[in-house]
């Protein structure tokens, strides 16, 4: 779609704009700024940066790409329950007759009905309630937690903390009582000691029985029948020991692992930062990716890769064959790895084995490695620019393609020169690949040809501009005569007095004889000159009769003669 800010531009202006755009993309020119003063990325296409015509925007940018019809999010506010605004001292007209508040009427009053209302007594006036107007959107009206204050849960946490502290204190008191009784025992009171030990053993046995009963309910299957309150028959198994922490309580962070209540599964690890030895639960996926599961997945991946390379293998159709081939692949891969490792050790040696060698043996081994790696005493000097001053330069690494091949007497390779979108030779600036090298003369000829081409292009542009202006004048021959044909003569117009006298005489003769100018009365093969000169136009203007001419009555109704104006 066309944009309103895409105006017509001449060739030079368009070229300058194109160069500026390229400079901005290359980072040579500062980026364009939008209405808000922010820089615009120069790599954004024009069809995205240009605004549509119906927005009437003359500035570039991406402001029109934003959602102009977006609605503001509803404010997270709620009614301020129990808040008071104003406390009056006497009853006011229009207030509640029962309590005296201005925010409601008597029928809506929530206070106990008084024997005599505040309207008649004028005492104990209730304060005005704070009325809040809240506009809720579709989601806000259906949000069950809208208006909930999380600080209210602090009371529950405080109560739980107090209960835990009381439990800890009671446990400490029991332990102190046990220690005190043991200290009060005497060596001769054997019966009492036996009784105390029996009591302790009895308490421990009771705890063990309770734990065993809880564990026994784990595999219990209960029958649930239809009842008057609804429900269906079926079996319910207690899948979790109640002493264990539930999955969804191991990490209360909202961004932790997701718990699916329908399947009671938590696939990810809820506590990834806890060490593995301290974890009790590492996610349901931990079981899936442990044991032989990983080996089975490797076999599947191997079967897919082998089948894609043309080998007849299928895990479901022939699982035994796939397992056998995967085992053979494992053995071959291990052998190849050991062979590669041995070749590397033979070439570079093993530093871990050098620790047990003597000093002399270690020196001999280092000399052998130096010769093996090709180290020499060749001396080379470089300058600050990296050029070789003294010695032989190191050989450059070559690719698999032919390099430095000079053909047709050229001293540079093809592609060492670039001009006007064409590759060429840098030695002679030739852009024809099978051409022969001409050296400096070829460079001069190429420069002269480039200058000649530039001159020809400029001349051609000038000729095109001149021809276009000439065609415009031919299409509209009245353009150059608009100065003389206006009602007010411009000062720049210059007239010849002699030609003007002849034109005035000719105009008087036309007015006196009344020459017919209708082409229908013109004779056959009779042509009149239709070109009107500036002097003839001035004579016509001077001789023209006007109804509002003040000199019309003085000169006999024919206006001025015109000669006094010359």
Image (spheres, helix red, strand yellow):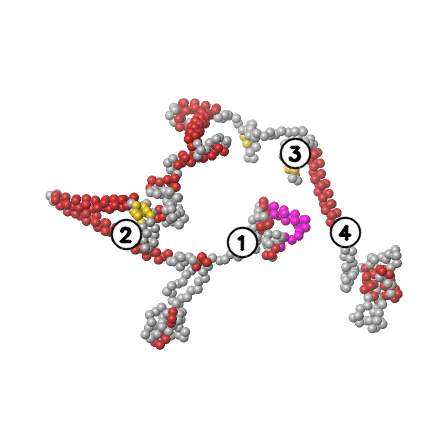
Give the residue pinned by disc 1: 66
Residue denoted by label 3: 425
- The residue mark sitting in front, 2 or 4, is 2
Q: In x, y percent, where is residue 163?
A: 27, 53
Label at residue 164? 2
Foreground mark, 3 or 4, reads: 4
Residue 337 visible in the displayed image: no
Dot 1 or dot 4: first in sequence order is: 1
Point out residue 350 in the picture as x, y percentages from the top left corner.
42, 27
Dot 2, how many residues are within 10 Å of its Cα: few (below 14), some (14-19), or many (20+)? few
> Which badge, 3 or 1, comes first in the chain's sequence?
1
How far apart in space, not on screen, are marks 3 and 4 (Cα)? 45 Å
Q: Are marks 3 and 4 in contact (CB under 8 Å)?
A: no
Q: CA distance from mark 3 to mark 1?
A: 52 Å
Give the mark, 2 or 1, whose residue is nearer the N terminus: 1
Q: Which label is found at residue 470?
A: 4
Circle 3: element type: loop
What residue span does the magenta drawing correspond to? 4-23
First reached walking from the N terminus: tag 2 or tag 4? 2
Which of the 4 quarters of the picture holds residue 453?
A: top right
Q: Position of residue 517 (x, y in %)?
A: 85, 62
Q: Quadrant of residue 266?
A: top left
Quote the CA–CA distance across marks 2 and 1: 55 Å
Q: Give how far apart the Cα atoms at labels 1 and 4 are.
A: 50 Å
Q: Which of pointers 2 and 3 indicates the residue nearer the eye?
A: 2
Q: Residue most toward the left?
A: 188
């Amino acid at each position: 779609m066309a944009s309103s800010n895409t105006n017509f531009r001449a060739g030079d202006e368009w070229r300058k704009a194109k160069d500026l755009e390229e400079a901005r993309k290359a980072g040579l020119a500062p980026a364009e700024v939008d209405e808000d003063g922010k820089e615009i990325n120069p790599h954004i296409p024009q069809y995205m940066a240009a605004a549509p015509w119906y927005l009437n925007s003359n500035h570039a940018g991406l402001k029109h790409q934003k959602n102009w019809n977006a609605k503001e999010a509803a404010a997270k506010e709620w009614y301020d329950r129990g808040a008071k605004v104003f406390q009056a001292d006497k009853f006011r007209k229009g207030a509640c007759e029962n309590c005296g508040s201005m925010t409601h009427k008597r029928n809506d009053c929530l206070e106990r009905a008084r024997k005599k209302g505040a309207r008649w007594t004028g005492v104990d006036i209730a304060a005005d309630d704070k009325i809040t107007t809240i506009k809720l959107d579709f989601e806000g009206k259906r949000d069950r937690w809208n208006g909930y204050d999380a600080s209210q849960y602090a009371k529950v946490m405080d109560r739980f903390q107090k209960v835990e502290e009381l439990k800890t204190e009671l446990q400490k008191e029991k332990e102190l009582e046990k220690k005190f009784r043991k200290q009060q025992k005497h060596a001769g009171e054997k019966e009492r000691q036996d009784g105390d030990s029996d009591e302790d053993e009895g308490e421990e046995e009771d705890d063990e029985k309770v734990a065993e009963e809880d564990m026994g309910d784990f595999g219990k299957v209960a029958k649930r029948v239809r009842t008057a309150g609804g429900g269906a028959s079926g079996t319910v198994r207690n899948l979790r020991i109640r002493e264990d922490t539930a999955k969804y309580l191991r990490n209360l962070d909202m961004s932790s692992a997701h718990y699916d209540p329908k399947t009671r599964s938590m696939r990810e690890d809820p506590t990834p930062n806890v060490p593995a030895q301290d974890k009790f639960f590492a996610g349901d996926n931990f079981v899936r990716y442990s044991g032989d599961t990983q080996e089975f997945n490797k076999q599947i991946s191997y079967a897919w890769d082998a089948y894609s390379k043309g080998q007849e293998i299928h895990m479901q159709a022939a699982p035994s064959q796939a397992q056998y081939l995967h085992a053979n692949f494992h053995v071959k891969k291990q052998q190849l790895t050991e062979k590669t490792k041995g070749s590397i050790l033979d070439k570079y040696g093993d530093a871990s084995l050098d620790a047990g060698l003597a000093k002399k043996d270690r020196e001999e081994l280092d000399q052998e490695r130096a010769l093996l790696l090709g180290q020499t005493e060749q001396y080379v000097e470089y300058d600050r620019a990296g050029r070789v001053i003294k010695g032989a330069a190191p050989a450059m690494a070559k690719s698999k393609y032919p390099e430095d091949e000079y053909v047709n007497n050229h001293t540079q390779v093809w592609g060492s020169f670039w001009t006007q979108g064409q590759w060429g030779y840098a030695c002679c600036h030739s852009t024809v690949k099978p051409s022969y090298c001409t050296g400096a003369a070829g460079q001069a000829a190429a420069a002269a040809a480039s200058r000649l081409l530039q001159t020809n292009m400029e001349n051609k542009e000038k000729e095109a501009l001149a021809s276009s202006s000439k065609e415009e004048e031919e299409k509209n021959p009245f353009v150059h005569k608009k100065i003389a044909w206006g009602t007010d003569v411009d000062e720049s117009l210059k007239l010849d007095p002699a030609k003007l006298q002849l034109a005035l005489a000719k105009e008087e003769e036309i007015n006196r004889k009344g020459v017919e100018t209708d082409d229908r009365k013109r004779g056959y093969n009779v042509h009149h000159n239709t070109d009107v000169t500036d002097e003839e136009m001035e004579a016509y203007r001077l001789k023209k009769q006007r109804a509002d001419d003040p000199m019309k009555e003085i000169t006999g109704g024919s206006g001025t003669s015109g000669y006094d104006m010359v």
